[in-house]
Image (tube, helix red, strand yellow):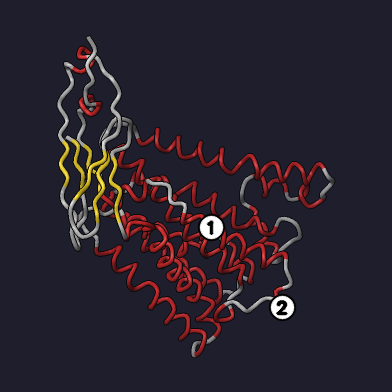
Amino acid sequence: MNERLDYGAQIDRTALVSESDTRALDFMPQLDGLRAFAVSAVLVHHLLDVSILPEAPFALSWGLLGVRLFFVLSGFLITGLLLSGRDAVEVRSVSRLHVLKQFYVRRALRIFPLYYLVIVLAMAFGDADARAQLPWLATYTYNFWISALGWFPAHFSHFWSLCVEEQFYLVWPLVVLFAPRSRLFGIALTMCALGPIYRLVAWNLAFGEVAFYTLTPSSLDSLGMGAMLAIASRSATDPMPERRLRYTALPIGIGAIALLATFGPMSLFAVFGETMVALVFVWLVAGASRGRSRQSYRMSRSGPGCSSITAVKGGGTKRRARTAPTLTRSQATSAKPMQRIAMPAGPGRRTLTMFA
């Protein structure tokens, strides 16, 4: 005779899920609005007469703002995905190589088909530039080629940002998965410093405008700030780094941009202005990523048959049961029992759900 038993009885592994971890794992549609703004700003910059548009703040270009916002978003989302994979590794459910392979396969399926389709279509319609530049386009090293060229060719010059993204995807997963977790925030902070350091060197050595903006080191501060936000927001033991980022990024970023644009020489604004822009976008992404969490936090154990714990702001918890699958007694006789412990929410606290 079959009996309906708790699906959690099958689980004999301990997992700890914090509010920030769950939020990073959840699909966050509110970030799509920021992504749409970033793409629209780049399209406006390339396709419309900028003279008929309102000027971007502090004489920045709409294209630059869109690209930097996109890089901050990318650093935040990709690092969140990789940290989720690392969580799975640390509870011994998968290997690092499996997570790495899964990440690369998903990125390839997401980006490669449309990217290479555009190149193939351009070649099919007789685009001479596509044929001449194919080795650089096909290997995502186009930003190196135009940097050496010193100017932006027609048709494919905007592909430089895709190349930066792919080069970031190639290296950053290895860092997140294999570096000590305690060092990740410091590594991301170092990336934030490397961006302006590179631009300072490029300015003094007269690399040229194209190399100044399009080589990957120039974007490390934007990517690193997104990564730093993801790492800080997933810390279950120390919430202070994330809070400091959320509360200080906007005033520091806006204040520094205003000072640089008003009193600083052009060289300082060129070197440090983009870092401050990225810092403002960190505040924007941090606020958007929290979404509805200002009202309630949804704490869920992934997988069918587990209940969901909702922590209501101001204290207390509410449990919403899901339908558990039907298991026979023989399937669960050897399984260890599962205990769910919910810590009540309250001002300044995190809500944790432990499955043991």
Looking at the rendered structure, the kind of residue marked 2 is: Ser
| Disc number for residue 51 | 2
Q: Is residue 185 visible?
A: no
Placement of the C terminus among the 4 image quadrants? top left
Residue 186, image x and y in percent? 32, 60
- Residue contact at pointers 2 and 1, CB within 8 angstroms: no
Q: Which residue is at a point 20% across and 35% down the rendered structure image? A: 14
Residue at which label 1 appears: 35
As displayed, is residue 242 above or below residue 312? Answer: below
Q: Earlier in the sequence, mark 2 or mark 1?
A: 1
Which sits in the foreground, 240 or 89?
240
Looking at the rendered structure, the kind of residue marked 1 is: Arg
- Say left or right for 36 vs 249: right
Dot 1 surroundings within 10 Å: few (below 14), some, or many (20 or more)?
A: some
As displayed, is residue 196 above or below residue 117? Answer: below
Q: Which residue is at a point 46% across and 56% down the rendered structure image? A: 30
Which sits in the foreground, 20 or 176?
20
Placement of the N terminus among the 4 image quadrants? top left
Residue 27, image x and y in percent? 43, 47
User: Under tag 1, what secondary structure?
Assistant: helix
Please tell me in which quadrant of the rendered image residue 249 appears: bottom left
Dot 2 surroundings within 10 Å: few (below 14), some, or many (20 or more)?
A: few
Residue 4, image x and y in percent? 23, 20
Q: Label 2 vs label 1: CA separation?
A: 24 Å
